[in-house]
Image (tube, grey):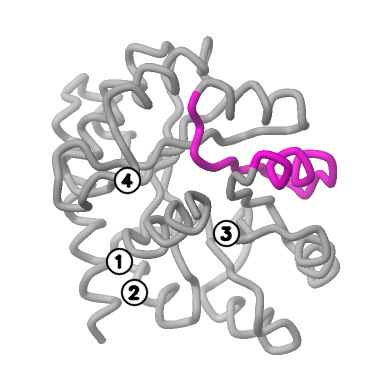
C-alpha cells in the first residue's frame, strides 16, 4: 500500500525536482527551497558527492504520508541510479522512489523486491515494452529535449498503458504542452536551480518552484 501512496503522491504533485549539487548540505538546502515553493517530489541524484547523506537527512524531516498541505509532506527519492547495488543503498537510506537514466533490468527487479516505485529511462518503443514487462511503474522519457511534447501521444499510440515522465527540456512555458500531450508528470533539473547556483541566492529555487507548481495546477485544470 505504501508504494501505491507514493506513486499517487508523485502523480498528484506532478513535478519532480531533479537536484544536483556539490555537497549533501547544498542539495538539502535546494530541496528545502523547492519544497517551500510547492515542488514536493525531490530526486537527489547519485552524482552528488555523498548523496546518501542528503537522502537520509531529508527523509528524517519529510514524510510522504503526511497531509499534502503540511509543511512536513514531501517524497524523497534517488536519481541517476545506474545499477541494483546503488538502488538498494538508496532505498536503505530512505529513498521512496528510484529513477534511472536508462533501463537496467536488475535495478528494476531490486526496486520491485522492496516495493519501491522505479522510473527507468526510456527512448524507444522497445524500451517501453521492456519496462512494462519488468513491472516499471513510470517511464522516464530521457533526455526529453530530444523531442517535443507530441512524442508522448506518438509513443502512447501503440502502448497506451505506459506512464511517461519527460525529464530534460521541460520548462514553465511548455509544461502545459507535455501534460496535455499525456505526460503523467515532469522532471525538472537545471532550469529550477541554475539561477540560484549562479547568484548564490537559494531563494531563487523557491520562486522557480512556485512557478512550476502553478503551471502544473493550471495544466491539470484545463
Query: Is residue 45 or residue 87 the one in the foreground?
Result: 87
Q: Position of residue 124 (x, y in %)?
A: 78, 67
- Residue 173, labelled with which disc? 1
Badge 4, how many Cα within 10 Å: few under 14, some, many 20+?
some
The residue pinned by badge 4 equals 65
Query: Is residue 168 or residue 220 the one in the foreground?
Result: 220
Task: Identify the residue at horizontal 68%, vertical 79% (top origin).
Answer: 155
- Residue 176, labelled with which disc? 2
Badge 3, how many Cα within 10 Å: few under 14, some, many 20+?
many
Quarter of image, res 23: top left
The nearer-to-camera label among 1 and 2 is 2
Task: Identify the residue at horizontal 48%, vertical 49% (top origin).
Answer: 2
- Magenta-colored span: 94-114
Badge 2, how many Cα within 10 Å: few under 14, some, many 20+?
many
Give the mark, 2 or 3, whose residue is nearer the N terminus: 3
Query: Is residue 53 or residue 180 the one in the foreground?
Result: 53
Quarter of image, res 27: top left
**Secondary structure beneath label 2:** helix
Quick check: is 109 in the magenta stretch? yes
The residue pinned by badge 3 equals 144
Vertical relation: 162 (above or below) 116: below
Give the mark, 2 or 4, whose residue is nearer the N terminus: 4
**Secondary structure beneath label 1:** loop
Give the mark, 1 or 4, whose residue is nearer the N terminus: 4
Q: Is residue 5 left or right of residue 140?
A: left
Q: CA distance from mark 1 to mark 3?
A: 15 Å
**Secondary structure beneath label 3:** helix
Give the mark, 1 or 3, whose residue is nearer the N terminus: 3
Amino acid at each position: 500500500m505504501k508504494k501505491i501512496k507514493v506513486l499517487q503522491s508523485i502523480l498528484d504533485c506532478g513535478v519532480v525536482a531533479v537536484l544536483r549539487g556539490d555537497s549533501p548540505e547544498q542539495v538539502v538546502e535546494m530541496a528545502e527551497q523547492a519544497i517551500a515553493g510547492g515542488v514536493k517530489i525531490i530526486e537527489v541524484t547519485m552524482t552528488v558527492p555523498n548523496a546518501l547523506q542528503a537522502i537520509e537527512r531529508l527523509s528524517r524531516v519529510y514524510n510522504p504520508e503526511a497531509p499534502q498541505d503540511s509543511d512536513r509532506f514531501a517524497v524523497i527519492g534517488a536519481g541517476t541510479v545506474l545499477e541494483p547495488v546503488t538502488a538498494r543503498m538508496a532505498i536503505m537510506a530512505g529513498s521512496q522512489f528510484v529513477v534511472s537514466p536508462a533501463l537496467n533490468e536488475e535495478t528494476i527487479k531490486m526496486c520491485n523486491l522492496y516495493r519501491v516505485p522505479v522510473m527507468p529511462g526510456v527512448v524507444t518503443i522497445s524500451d517501453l515494452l521492456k519496462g512494462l514487462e519488468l513491472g516499471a511503474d513510470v517511464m522516464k522519457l530521457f533526455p526529453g529535449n530530444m523531442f517535443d511534447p507530441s512524442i508522448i501521444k506518438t509513443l502512447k499510440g501503440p502502448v497506451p498503458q505506459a506512464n511517461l515522465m519527460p525529464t530534460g527540456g521541460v520548462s514553465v512555458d511548455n509544461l502545459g504542452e507535455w501534460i496535455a500531450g499525456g505526460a503523467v508528470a515532469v522532471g525538472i533539473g537545471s532550469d529550477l536551480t541554475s539561477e540560484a547556483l549562479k547568484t548564490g541566492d537559494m531563494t531563487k529555487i523557491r520562486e522557480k518552484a512556485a512557478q512550476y507548481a502553478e503551471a502544473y495546477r493550471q495544466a491539470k485544470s484545463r
